[in-house]
Each structure stands twice: as structure tokens, then as C-alpha cells.
Amino acid sequence: MDFASEINQLIVQQFVLDANDNKSYSKQDILATINYLIEHDMQKLLFILYRVDVAEEKIRASLSNSMNEDAAEIIYQHIHDREVEKAASRKKYSSSGGYLDF
């Protein structure tokens, strides 16, 4: 699995889209889910952002600075960026055998 597919899979898992089926979920599927949560279940969206470890303040700032952009796209980008950071960190520390070099 390439890096982009790995990140997409991690994002899908956060939204409890059935990642165990054989269907491939696109960015558009995830954006539709985010839009649905914005309109119908903001608490669940905030919980997902907390679980992914995306700072709510960063999203609020981005949303207020980007009045013409789609809110779901902005939120997706923050989630994507955070998943990339976490994957890079896992890769960095797993290659050293799990031990910190001092």
C-alpha cells in the first residue's frame, strides 16, 4: 500500500466508513461524510477531530480566514495533514527499533 492510500485508509477509519469492506473510499466520500456531520451531528465531528488530534482552534482560524472555501475541504485538509504527521512519526520511530537514540 502506498503512502497516500495508507493516509486515506486512516482517515476512512476515523469516520467509521466501513474500512473492512473491499470498497475504496474517495476523498469525495469523506467530504460528503464531513458535510453530513457538519449539518447533522457536529458533536460527532468534534469528537473525531479530538480523536485525530486536530486542534479545534486551528480549524476555527482556518474557517474564519477562508470564507469562500468549502468547510468540509478545510476540515479534511487538517485531518489529512495530521494523519501525515502521525504516519511520519510512526515511521521515524519504528525504524529505530522503538528506542530513542541518546
Image (cartoon, rainbow, N blue to C red):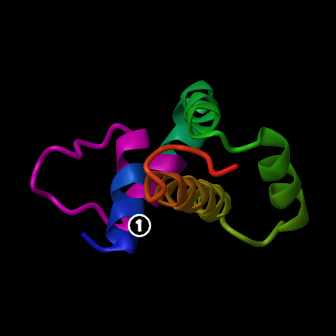
Residue 87, percent from left and from top = 49, 57
1 left or right of 79?
A: left
> Is residue 13 placed above or below 3 in the rendered structure?
above
Residue at image x 48%, y 55%? 96
Residue at 57% over, 32% down: 51
Residue type for callout 1: Lys
Report crowding for label 1: few under 14, some 14 to 19, many 20 or more residues within 10 A (C-alpha). Answer: some
Q: Secondary structure at mark 1?
A: helix
Please give the residue where the numbered disc 1 appears in the rendered image. Answer: 27
Work out whether 67 lies above or below 98.
below
Across and down, in percent, residue 15 comes to: 41, 41
Q: Is residue 83 above or below residue 38?
A: below
Magenta region = 12-35
Q: Is residue 75 left or right of residue 20?
A: right
* Lateral position of residue 45 relative to residue 22, left or right: right
Residue at screen point 61% across, 46% down: 100
Q: What residue is rendered at 82% in x and 59% in y?
A: 62
Q: Where is residue 43? Give x, y as percent.
A: 61, 25
